[in-house]
């Protein structure tokens, strides 16, 4: 599928989804959010895609925020609709995606950009990355899950400070805060992230999908994550991947998971 605002590249099971609006520092507008939704929907159905790496074009920005010009004159109701639709179509969609999603954060990840990176299952950053939620400087609050996911990742106090000051932290601070898992040189970012993806691909995608559901259940109100884990654990025994994985282990060979 051809897109105007993003580029997709499949490299031996690793799908790169690249936000490609360099003149706008890859800012998110409605069209880009829709295209990302379509790309992730296609990736979910494509059996050749095992892992998704999400990044921005160039070295200046992952995503420098939302396109403010699109909603500067919105009413309260339009604002609620904007947040609800964006969360459903992209941010929650990515967070609950059944295949591993890694955000490769190159440069600025601000506002909606940081919210998109946080929706990924984990993050790798270049050492020139800058991250923040500056919405309060616009008279807003984060609307794409930022007030929920940031405290989950960095703790309530640090999240409150970042949101209230509307300031940025650098990659080193993000690593200290557990906001990112790794930091590397900008020209090594994609290669480094691909190496992690390759390690992931050695394992059972069926099991990883179950693990994503179980881990996410811990953050859902009214859901007992332990019960979800027990259910997903039990269901794993009925999969072909379990049979292959245990057989390979017992026979001291490398597993070749069928993905079923």
Image (spheres, rainbow, N blue to C red):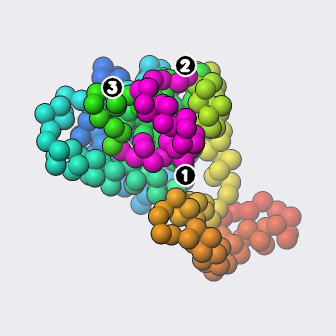
| Residue 166 drawn in magenta | yes
The magenta segment is: 144-170
Instruction: Give the total of numbered labels.
Output: 3
What secondary structure is the stretch in magenta mostly built from?
Answer: helix
Q: Is residue 76 visible?
A: yes
Q: CA distance from mark 1 to mark 2?
A: 25 Å
Residue 228 image point, x, y percent: 57, 72
Left/right placement of residue 165 relative to residue 232 reads left
Q: Residue at x 78, y 60 (%)?
A: 254
- The residue that label 2 is drawn on is 128
- The residue that label 1 is drawn on is 100
Instruction: Indicate which disc residue 162 carries.
Output: none
In the structure shown, which secondary structural element does the residue marked by tag 1 occupy? Answer: loop
Q: CA distance from mark 3 to mark 1?
A: 33 Å
User: Where is residue 137, by image quadrant?
Assistant: top left
User: Where is residue 256, by image quadrant?
Assistant: bottom right
Disc number lying in front (3 or 1): 3
Above/below status of 125 relative to 249 = above
Above/below status of 207 relative to 76 = below
Q: Residue at x 68, y 47 (%)?
A: 199
- The residue that label 3 is drawn on is 137
């Amino acid at each position: 599928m051809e897109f105007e605002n993003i580029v997709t590249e499949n490299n031996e099971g690793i799908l790169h989804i690249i936000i490609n609006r360099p003149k706008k520092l890859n800012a998110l507008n409605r069209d880009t959010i829709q295209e990302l939704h379509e790309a992730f929907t296609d990736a979910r159905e494509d059996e050749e895609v095992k892992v998704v790496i999400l990044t921005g074009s160039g070295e200046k920005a992952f995503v420098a925020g939302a396109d403010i010009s699109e909603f500067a004159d919105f009413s309260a109701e339009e604002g609620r609709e904007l947040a609800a639709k964006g969360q459903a179509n992209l941010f929650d969609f990515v967070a609950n995606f059944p295949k591993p999603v890694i955000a490769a954060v190159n440069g600025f990840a601000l506002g909606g950009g940081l919210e998109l990176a946080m929706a990924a299952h984990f993050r790798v950053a270049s050492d020139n990355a800058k991250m923040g939620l500056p919405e309060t400087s616009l008279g807003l609050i984060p609307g794409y899950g930022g007030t929920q996911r940031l405290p989950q990742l960095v703790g309530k106090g640090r999240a409150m400070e970042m949101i209230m000051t509307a300031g940025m932290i650098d990659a080193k601070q993000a690593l200290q805060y557990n906001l990112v898992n790794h930091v590397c040189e900008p020209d090594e970012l994609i290669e480094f992230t691909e190496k992690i993806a390759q390690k992931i691909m050695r394992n059972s995608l069926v099991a990883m999908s179950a693990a994503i559901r179980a881990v996410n259940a811990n953050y859902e109100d009214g859901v007992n994550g332990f019960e979800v884990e027990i259910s997903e654990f039990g269901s794993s025994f009925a999969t072909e991947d379990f049979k292959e994985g245990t057989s390979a282990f017992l026979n001291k060979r490398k597993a070749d998971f069928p993905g079923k």
